[in-house]
Structure formats: structure tokens, C-alpha cells
Amino acid sequence: MRSLLLFSLSLLIFTTAAHAEKLLVVKQSPHSVSKTLDRLTAVMQKKGITIFARVNHAAGAKKAGMDMKPTELLIFGNPKLGTPLMLAKREIGVDLPLKALAWQDDGGKVWLGYTTPAALKARHGVSGRDEIFKKMTGALDKLTSVAIKAE
């Protein structure tokens, strides 16, 4: 009985970890939080991607009397890709435009993360738009890789 319980817990942990990997892509950046998002913004603008907003969570925390390591959110999108997804399943608009979060951890390392298009597809049950999700996946990987590239 005990071995069955241990096996079940191991399986649960493994499947949860495997599932979590598909939800979020996280890459380490050699740059500061601000510079990472500056670089991401620049490469996105060159590609014609709209930057809707940039949110400085650490500044917001400071205004509320709390300390937070540098943490910033970039909100961006491409209506040519996002609109067909919303036409297929309007509820996906709660996750569009897309977002990328850059943050500094307690050890001083900087990270850049974003929700995978596959997670958005699964969350909202979008079908028939595989080519769009494939384009989004490739673009996000390339754009974020350029942003975190060492100089």
C-alpha cells in the first residue's frame, strides 16, 4: 500500500512538472530587467509588433509601501495573429494581447518568461488555428532569444 502511495505521488509530481513546463517558457537574461525589456521592445518594434503597455510592478509595490526586486511586464501583440484567434474563441481575449515578464530573483539573476501559445490554445479550447499558434511559438522564441542575447 505504501509503495502504491509513493508511486502515485511520484507520478503526480512528474505529470505536474511536465505540465508546468508547457505553460511557461522562462529564459535567463544576462541583462538587467529594464534592459531586457528595452531589448525585447526594440526587436518587437522592428518586426511591426505593437507594444501596448509596460508595467513596472516594483514601482507599484514601492508606492504601496512594499519592496520588490525589479519586475516589469511588457504587453504586446499582433492583431493579424490575435484577431483570428479571438474570432475562433472570443474568450482567449482575456489572455491577449500577449505578455512577457522580466524579473530579478533573490539571487540577483534576471529572468524573462511568457505563457506558451500551446497553453493558451489548451486553456481556451481553440481549434483550427494551429498555423497561427505555430507562428506565435516560433516568433516568441526568436524574439525573446534576441532580447536575452549577450552583447
Image: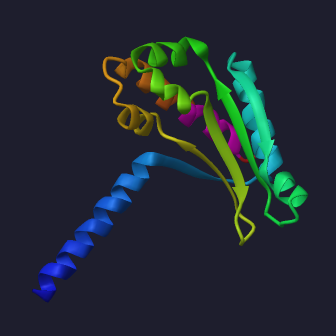
Q: How many marks?
A: 0
Q: Classify residue 27 as left or right of residue 74.
A: left
User: Percent x, y for residue 25?
Assistant: 52, 47
Q: Classify residue 4 as left or right of residue 61.
A: left
Residue drawn at 76 percent across, 45 percent down: 36
Residue lying furthest bottom: 2
Residue drawn at 68 percent across, 20 percent down: 49
User: Percent x, y for residue 20?
Assistant: 41, 55
The reply to whether residue 77 is in sight is yes
Secondary structure mainly formed by the magenta segment: helix
User: Is residue 146 shown in magenta?
Assistant: yes
* Residue 52: quadrant of the picture: top right
The quadrant of the image that shows the C terminus is top right
The reply to whether residue 151 is in sight is no
Q: Of residues 82 and 145, which is closer to you in this image?
A: 82
Q: How is the image coloured?
A: rainbow
User: Is residue 78 shown in magenta?
Assistant: no
Is residue 45 positioned above or below 108 on the image? above
Is residue 34 positioned above or below 129 on the image? below
Q: Of residues 119 and 134, which is closer to you in this image?
A: 119
Q: Of residues 91 and 134, which is closer to you in this image?
A: 91
The quadrant of the image that shows the N terminus is bottom left
User: Percent x, y for residue 119?
Assistant: 42, 39
Is residue 134 positioned above or below 149 on the image? above
Residue lying furthest left: 1
User: Percent x, y for residue 100?
Assistant: 64, 41
Residue drawn at 18 percent across, 76 percent down: 7
Magenta-drawn segment:
140-149
* Residue 128: quadrant of the picture: top left
Q: Classify residue 117 as left or right of residue 36.
A: left
Residue drawn at 63 percent across, 37 percent down: 99
